[in-house]
Amino acid sequence: MRLAFAIVLTAALALHAPADAKKPKKPVIKTSDILQATNLTPFLPPALTPENSWDLDLSDGGRVVIQLRPDRAPKMVERVKTLTKQGFYNGLNFHRVIEGFMAQGGDPKGTGEGGSSMPDVQSEFNDLPHVRGAVAAARAADENSANSQFYIMFMPNLKLDKHYTVFGRVVSGMQYVDAIQRGEPPANPTKIVRAVMGDDPAASTPPPPLPVAPAVQAPVALPSGPLTPPAGSTPQK
């Protein structure tokens, strides 16, 4: 009798127990709660300003806008600004462009061995990652040998982090970066028609066309057959 009563009581309690008592609820974390509880400001780039907007007008017909980061690489950013105001980058090729990796330019020699007449820039390795569109200073084996050359990443390559100075990132016109001619060097390299800072009044005007290379004249064809001196002439000894 007692056993039967215990079974009935247990069944009654189970039927009338709240649903929550059967299975504990999983905590629900809302994105809004995370944003309110976390300060993401240190991880976000600063607002894009004209004085830190590096505009590259390319020969493939587009403008690439790069946000410079003086907060992470002040020395390299200052070098880029100085050379840009001098017109140093105008007309230079992207001389080393590797599919799935990066496009490198800024060398007046076009061989990867050149730079400006200014001293090399000390390394400024930072926490900016080598993601798609990242812009960094090219250098030789010496970590402090960056000068005028730079590269733009086609794809992420985080193995390069903390080994090269990332000083900016493409914020507009990445499709024109993707169109840069490949090769080491390319057969028909893409050129920087003009590099200009966003606070330069010239930034709002179209770039001047690149100078047209002089046409190469075909060599004069020599006459066929044996050469005979004109009548009355004598050969020179």
Image (cartoon, helix red, strand yellow):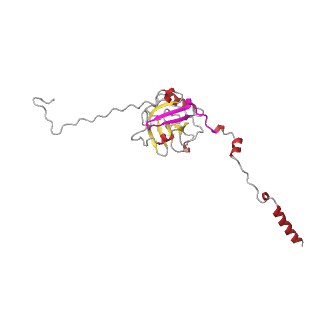
Picture mark count: 0
**The C terminus, quarter of image:** top left
Q: Is residue 12 visible?
A: yes
Q: Is residue 75 visible?
A: no
At 83% from the left and 66% from the top, the residue drawn is: 11
**The N terminus, quarter of image:** bottom right
Please provide percent x and percent y for residue 229: 13, 32
Q: Is residue 7 left or right of residue 116?
A: right
Q: Is residue 3 left or right of residue 74?
A: right
At 62% from the left and 38% from the top, the residue drawn is: 44
Residue placed most toward the observer, 26 or 17: 17
Query: Looking at the image, which residue sits at the far bottom?
Result: 1
Quadrant in the rendering for residue 171: top right
Location of residue 31 with respect to 88 vertically, above or below: below
Residue placed most toward the observer, 38 or 151: 38
Q: Is residue 3 left or right of residue 137?
A: right
Q: Which region is colored magenta? A: 43-68
Please provide percent x and percent y for residue 52: 56, 31
Quadrant in the rendering for residue 71: top right
Residue placed most toward the observer, 125 or 55: 55
Query: Looking at the image, which residue sits at the far left?
Result: 232
Please provide percent x and percent y for residue 98: 46, 44
At 88% from the left and 69% from the top, the residue drawn is: 5
